[in-house]
Image (cartoon, rainbow, N blue to C red):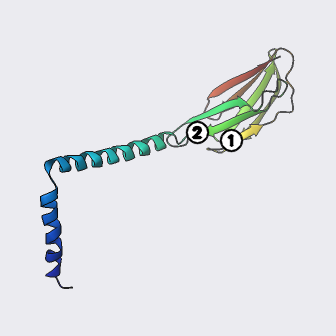
Amino acid sequence: MNGTDKPNMIAPIRAFLRRRLTAEAALTVAIALFLVLATGSLFYRVDRGLDPDLDKDWWTLAFDSRDSLSLDFVIENHSEAHSFTYVVTSSGMVIGSDSFPVAPGARHVVRPDIRALPGRTAITVSGEDGTEKEIYRQR
């Protein structure tokens, strides 16, 4: 092929588009293109918003089971904190405490060797950044 063949191949395509592409068709194509771009943009934003580690700084604390005697708890870390400390109290007395590491983006189960005592047993967990959360069992 030489350079003169290309304009001859494109000319029929241009002629076809001039004859077939009316104002209504151009509007339909423009609306369809807009909808495709808008939908793609929304899917991208929702996907980014659902990523728990993207520009987020939070962690959660919950009991591992519904067993009323178990004090096993779970930390799900989506913050920059790496080190956490827990204190278990019952009737105002400290009955156990420890520190443990949790990597950002990880989920860690802590199993203290303590059983819930009668009354209210509270677990207070502190992150190295100073944030603090508490959960308790009532027996």
Vertical order, 128 against 31 (above or below): above
Q: Amino acid at mark 1?
A: Arg
Labelled disc at residue 107: 1
Category of crowding for the residue at label 1, using alpha-carbon neighbours closer than 10 angstroms: few (below 14), some (14–19), many (at least 20): some
Say above or below: 114 vs 14.
above
- Image point (79%, 21%), residue name: 89
Q: Position of residue 132 (x, y in %)?
A: 65, 27
How far apart are the alpha carbons under marks 2 and 1?
12 Å
Q: Residue at x 87, y 26 (%)?
A: 115
Q: Which residue is mark 2?
A: 79
Q: Position of residue 66 (x, y in %)?
A: 78, 27
**Dot placed on the residue nearer the N-terminal end, 2 or 1:** 2
Q: Position of residue 42 (x, y in %)?
A: 39, 42
Q: Are marks 2 and 1 in contact (CB under 8 Å)?
A: no
Label 1 secondary element: strand
Residue 23 relative to residue 76: left or right? left
Given residues 23 and 75, the one toward you in this image is 23
Name the residue furthest front. 20
